[in-house]
Image (spheres, coloured by chain):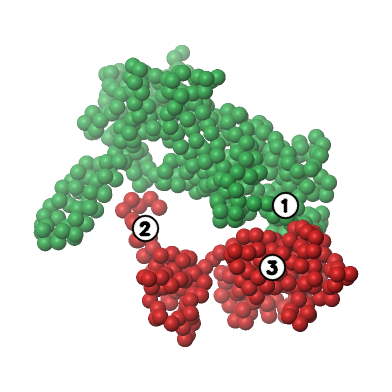
Chain colours: A red, B green
């Protein structure tokens, strides 16, 4: 920080050398070498210059032709079809306003619950948590949520109970990591503790266990696994479950 | 943007945990998170991290006219901003920023923490106007405390340019002529926040954002290390009795003492780091930097111009620059900011006669010829200031003659 002769590109050079093998750090404005017919994921855009990076992070590639940039971010951009957890902030006539952390509060119609009719309204209060799927999600309209699938079944969607449960926020990549089959966190925790949880792709997680102590342990494990690899996750799960079982 | 409505789940879990005497992040009810203080390159910038909360404070000073009601005092203005990464869609001015601005003004300005009379240059005409800007980079709970500590640290760290007043003319001295002057901070007030639950029965210190949202009210105590209450601020729908307030102020006193001592250590460490890199503060620092960049540009220009400059020419130019630099790299110099050139200490023991008190800051030595008076660079007197030049310094002063320079002891 004090060295007057070190330029920003020197500093970036040091960080590149310090990074593990095979990780390519990119900054917004960089151009990536890619053929014409590739699939571009989040963080990349096609430009006259080529494939331009929009967000800082790690450039990843999956054969045969998918490129994307892994970014650390906490702000959610709604995508149709994703499951999110939201807080009901208001009841407005025939629908609820649900805050999912997007640019606008989302709407959830009261008929979008399993078994709901005009006479049989669902029991949803202001302040409740709902797990819902995004039906409409684009930057021009307010997002719309539903708590049923196309056949009218809930399949786990709906209101999440409040007693004995914890609701917390994590960065977006942690949600994806926890749900990915390659990450052994849930399996390891599940073999020691008994709990249920719901992960929203908007960075919110709901977890419930036998008591607040175990729930807090699950929450701590999920928050802590952000930068850990498999071995560290295994060690961390052991420590956390041991601490949770102790001092009952 | 409307404030986030906390979900019933969140509120219940926090209230549940607190009533059982635990907290969701594993701390004890009255445990504070550790604060990390990081100073920036410029004088007067400071970043504070308190768990997930981050605040960045910057102090700027410019000369201006004083307020008509206070013609002898400088001014201090506070502005608070929340960055868009901290709170997406936040307006420029909402409850949080406006409330925090007012609270910081009360804590720092109205408690007279900075001596505003010392900021006066010419009464009625020119005073220093300080602008304190606090950015909340991340909101992880207790933004009040982080912002207040950042503001205080920035004020303690800041150096303003030295001003010389000759006749009616006010002149800003650049950094290589006269060392920038720190502000006169009379005491160091910090804010300590407590969140109340269960109708005032339980309270926690240093709440996280979930705890803040779920609480019934917040009590912020502004306190300095002398156990003086600088400000008290109560928000939310809460009624407290005297006992609870006194209890909180006791805890705040302990926290204020530990924070101010941590701040003092951080300031000393920062000063030591700066002097280690630039052993000749003020006088030669700008010169050195200019030389260093000149040396670098010599090498660079050699590479850019290619065959126009031969290798010998480049090495000759480098030698020239090195020679100039070597004037400042004297072997006998210690790393500390000494301007005198070696020899025994010229500070005599304090004399026993009646005038000993008066001179305890300026220990007397043997009869000294009237050398250029080392007017303390950190006191702004209205008289003429003399500027010291390298040619005035005599190397290898003999002890006892009083030649060479005496480094004035800064007033603490």
Relative to the observer, which residue lies in front, A186 or A130?
Answer: A130
Q: Name the residue beneath numbered marker 2.
A: A8
Q: CA distance from mark 3 to mark 1?
A: 26 Å
The residue most toward the top is B354
| Residue B141 visible in the current orientation | yes
Q: Residue at x 78, y 80 (%)?
A: A153
Relative to the observer, which residue lies in front, A119 or B10?
Answer: A119
Residue A155 point in image, percent of width and height = 76, 79
Does label 1 lie on the same chain as label 2?
Answer: no
Is B272 located above or below residue A26 in the figure?
above
CB under 8 Å between callouts 3 and 2? Answer: no
Residue B227 point in image, percent of width and height = 66, 33
Q: Chain of mark 3?
A: A
Relative horizontal placement of residue A202, taking residue B23 as reference (left or right): left
Is A204 located above or below residue B368 in the figure?
below
Other-residue count near label 1 (Cα within 10 Å), few / some / many at <14 / 14–19 / ≥20: many
- The secondary structure type at the circle numbered 2 is helix
Q: Which mark is residue A144?
A: 3
Q: Residue at x 62, y 79 (%)?
A: A180
Q: Name the residue beneath numbered marker 1.
A: B213
Residue A29 point in image, percent of width and height = 40, 65
Q: Residue at x 61, y 74 (%)?
A: A176
Mark nearer the N terminus (3 vs 2): 2
Q: CA distance from mark 2 to mark 1?
A: 40 Å
Residue B73 point in image, percent of width and height = 51, 23
The residue most toward the bottom is A64
Other-residue count near label 3 (Cα within 10 Å), few / some / many at <14 / 14–19 / ≥20: many
- The secondary structure type at the circle numbered 3 is strand
Other-residue count near label 2 (Cα within 10 Å), few / some / many at <14 / 14–19 / ≥20: few
Q: Chain of mark 1?
A: B
């Amino acid at each position: 920080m004090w060295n007057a002769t070190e330029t920003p590109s020197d500093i970036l050079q040091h960080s590149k050398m310090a990074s593990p093998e095979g990780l390519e750090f990119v900054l917004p404005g960089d151009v990536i070498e890619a053929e014409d017919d590739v699939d571009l994921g989040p963080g990349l855009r096609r430009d006259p210059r080529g494939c331009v990076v929009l967000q800082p992070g790690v450039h990843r590639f999956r054969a045969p032709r998918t490129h994307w940039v892994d970014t650390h971010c906490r702000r959610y951009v709604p995508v149709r079809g994703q499951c999110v957890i939201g807080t009901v902030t208001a009841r407005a006539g025939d629908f609820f306003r649900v805050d999912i952390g997007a640019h606008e509060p989302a709407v959830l119609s009261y008929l979008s619950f399993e078994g709901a009719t005009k006479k049989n309204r669902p029991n949803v209060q202001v302040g409740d948590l709902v797990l819902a799927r995004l039906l409409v999600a684009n930057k021009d309209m307010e997002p719309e949520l539903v708590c049923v699938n196309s056949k009218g079944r809930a399949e786990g969607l709906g209101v999440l109970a409040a007693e004995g449960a914890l609701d917390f926020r994590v960065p977006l990549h942690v949600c994806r990591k926890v749900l990915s089959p390659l990450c052994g966190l849930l399996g390891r925790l599940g073999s020691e503790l008994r709990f249920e949880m719901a992960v929203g792709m908007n960075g919110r997680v709901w977890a419930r266990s036998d008591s607040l102590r175990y729930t807090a342990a699950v929450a701590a494990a999920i928050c802590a696994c952000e930068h850990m690899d498999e071995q560290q996750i295994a060690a961390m799960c052991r420590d956390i479950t041991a601490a949770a079982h102790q001092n009952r | 943007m409307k404030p986030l409505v906390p979900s019933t789940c969140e509120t219940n879990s926090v209230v549940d945990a607190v009533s059982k005497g635990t907290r969701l992040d594993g701390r004890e009810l009255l445990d504070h998170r550790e604060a990390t203080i990081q100073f920036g390159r410029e004088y007067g910038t400071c970043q504070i991290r308190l768990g997930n909360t981050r605040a960045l404070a910057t102090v700027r000073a410019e000369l201006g006219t004083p307020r008509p009601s206070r013609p002898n005092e400088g001014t201090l203005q506070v502005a608070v901003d929340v960055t868009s990464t901290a709170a997406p869609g936040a307006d420029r001015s909402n409850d949080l920023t406006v409330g925090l601005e007012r609270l910081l003004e009360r804590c720092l300005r109205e408690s007279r923490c900075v001596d505003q009379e010392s900021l006066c240059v010419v009464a009625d005409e020119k005073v220093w106007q300080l602008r304190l800007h606090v950015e909340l980079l991340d909101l992880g709970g207790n933004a009040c405390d982080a912002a207040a500590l950042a503001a205080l640290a920035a004020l303690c760290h800041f150096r303003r340019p030295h001003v010389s007043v000759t006749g009616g003319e006010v002149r800003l001295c650049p950094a290589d002529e006269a060392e920038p002057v720190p502000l006169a901070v009379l005491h160091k007030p910090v804010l300590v926040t407590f969140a109340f639950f269960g109708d005032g029965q339980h309270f926690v210190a240093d709440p996280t954002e979930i705890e803040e949202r779920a609480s019934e009210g917040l009590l912020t105590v502004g306190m300095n290390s002398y156990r003086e209450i600088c400000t008290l601020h109560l928000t939310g729908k809460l009624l407290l009795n005297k006992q609870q307030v006194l209890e909180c102020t006791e805890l705040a006193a302990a926290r204020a003492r530990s924070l101010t001592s941590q701040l003092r250590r951080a300031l000393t460490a920062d000063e030591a780091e700066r002097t280690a890199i630039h052993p000749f503060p003020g006088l030669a620092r700008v010169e050195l930097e200019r030389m260093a960049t000149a040396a670098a540009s010599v090498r660079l220009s050699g590479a850019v111009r290619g065959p126009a400059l031969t290798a010998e020419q480049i090495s000759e130019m480098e030698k020239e620059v090195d020679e100039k630099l070597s004037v400042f790299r004297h072997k006998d110099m210690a790393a500390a900011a000494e301007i005198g050139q070696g020899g025994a200490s010229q500070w005599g023991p304090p004399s026993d006669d009646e005038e000993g008190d008066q001179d305890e800051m300026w220990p007397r030595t043997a009869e000294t010829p009237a050398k250029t008076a080392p007017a303390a660079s950190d006191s702004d007197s209205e008289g003429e200031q003399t500027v010291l030049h390298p040619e005035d310094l005599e190397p290898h002063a003999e002890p006892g003659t009083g030649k060479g320079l005496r480094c004035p002891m800064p007033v603490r």
